[in-house]
Amino acid sequence: MLREFAVDVHPTRVRFAENVLRQMELVAVGTARATPGAAQLVLGALGAGRQVAVVSNNSDASVEKYLDQENLRSNFTFVSARYSAMDPALLKPDPHLLHRALDWLNTAPSDAVIVGDSIADIEAGRVAGVMTIGFSTRQAKRDDLLEAGADAVCDDLFRIVDALAPKPEDRT
């Protein structure tokens, strides 16, 4: 929304809109509910020896507040989210936020995966050269994510958790 709004609007109004949006997001954190399997996915990735970052078009303040609320912040190596004075054109689907995370993690795109629930997530991942997994509990949205170029889609994050778990043959 901010990305589209900012195209033909004076920068002062864009900053005002971003500040209002940031405040609304901070309020919304109080009613946000975790997606089933999300915490387990993060812990599973960590258990598999991977670093985990958040890449979000939401404000950095709201993402950090949510992670604190859910007691998850210490599990993330980096939060790459909308920051103050950021050019809205750099929001996903632009890969800027994803590139920031990859740079911070010192990770090549070919060694990374983005799990996202929006077409913008998938498009950013594709442009960045990162494997993309689309997530939605709705079939129509999964179809849209596939059409956008997701490498895979799922309707249950526990499937990804299971895929990260060591297999019996890996334990020998």
Image (cartoon, rainbow, N blue to C red):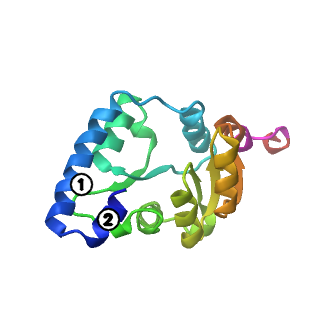
Percent position of residue 70, x then y: 41, 29
Residue located beneath label 2 in the image: 88
- Does the stretch in magenta take in 170? no
Q: Is residue 46 left or right of residue 63?
A: right
Q: Which mark sits nearer the N-terminus, 2 or 1?
A: 1
Could you say which quadrant of the image residue 81 lies in? bottom left
In the image, residue 114 sits, relative to residue 108, either above or below, namely above
In the image, residue 31 sits, relative to residue 92, either above or below, namely above
Q: Residue at x 32, y 58 (%)?
A: 2
Question: Which quadrant holds the N terminus?
Answer: bottom left
Percent position of residue 7, x then y: 31, 71
Name of the residue lying farthest toward the front: 8
Residue located beneath label 1 in the image: 18
Task: Name the foreground residue: 140 vs 164.
Answer: 140
Task: Name the foreground residue: 36 vs 101.
Answer: 36
Q: Residue at x 40, y 38 (%)?
A: 74
How far separated are the C-alphas under marks 2 and 1? 9 Å
Percent position of residue 85, x then y: 21, 63
- Dot 2 and dot 1 residues touching (CB under 8 Å): yes
- Does the stretch in magenta take in 164? yes
Residue bounds of the magenta highlight: 162-168
